[in-house]
Amino acid sequence: MSPDAIRSFQLTASALRNAALGHTATFRSQPIRVVLSPIAIGLDLETGGLRQGGEFSCRFLATSLSTPPRRGEQILIGGKSYTVQSLKEVISTPGEYVATIAPGSSL
């Protein structure tokens, strides 16, 4: 398979995933569809147990945004506000911006 065919397949897969699994959110005062997936449960060393911190992996279609999301920006999903914590390298996710978001106010 050629590099162009692989990239075309990845872009098509991103668009189909967004259409099938996307949630409507408000980002930069505009409605947008994003795909959310919860981040794994972590270990809480203070209490000695496990915790779910409410962090999500959030996939934005690159074609939906004029510029990539930035750390500290807010996104509203289901009436709850989340803050962009970090952004994954675009090279590993062609056609998408993948951010880690967490509930609460900006940093």
Image: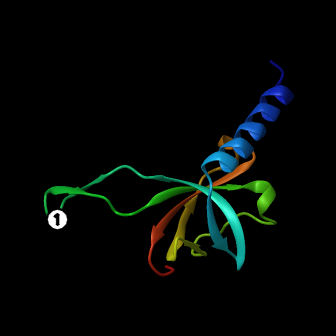
Coloring applied to the structure: rainbow
Q: Position of residue 57 (x, y in %)?
A: 52, 55
* Label 1 packing within 10 angstroms: few (<14), some (14-19), many (20+): few
Q: Residue furthest front?
A: 20
Residue 66 relative to residue 102: left or right? right
- Residue, x 55% and y 62% (percent of image)? 86
Q: Is residue 5 above or below residue 69?
A: above
> Is 9 drawn above or below residue 75 in the view shown?
above
Quadrant of the image occupied by residue 27: bottom right
- Decide which of 55, 29 is in the foreground and name it: 29
Q: Secondary structure at mark 1?
A: loop
Please identify the residue farthest to the left as the structure is shown. 48
Q: Is residue 68 left or right of residue 41?
A: right
In the rendered structure, the answer to whether residue 25 lies left or right of residue 31 reads left
The answer to whether 80 is drawn above or below residue 33 in the figure is: below
Percent x, y of residue 8:
82, 34
- The N terminus lies in which quarter of the figure? top right
Depth check: give the residue in front, 37 or 20.
20
Report which quarter residue 14 is drawn in.
top right
Query: Within the image, what quadrant is residue 29 found in?
Result: bottom right
Tell me what residue is drawn at x 65 percent, y 46 percent. Answer: 20
Amino acid marked by disc 1: Glu
User: Where's residue 96, x and y in %?
Assistant: 70, 50
Give percent across and percent down for residue 55: 43, 61
Residue plotted at (65% across, 73% down)? 26
Q: Which residue is mark 1?
A: 46
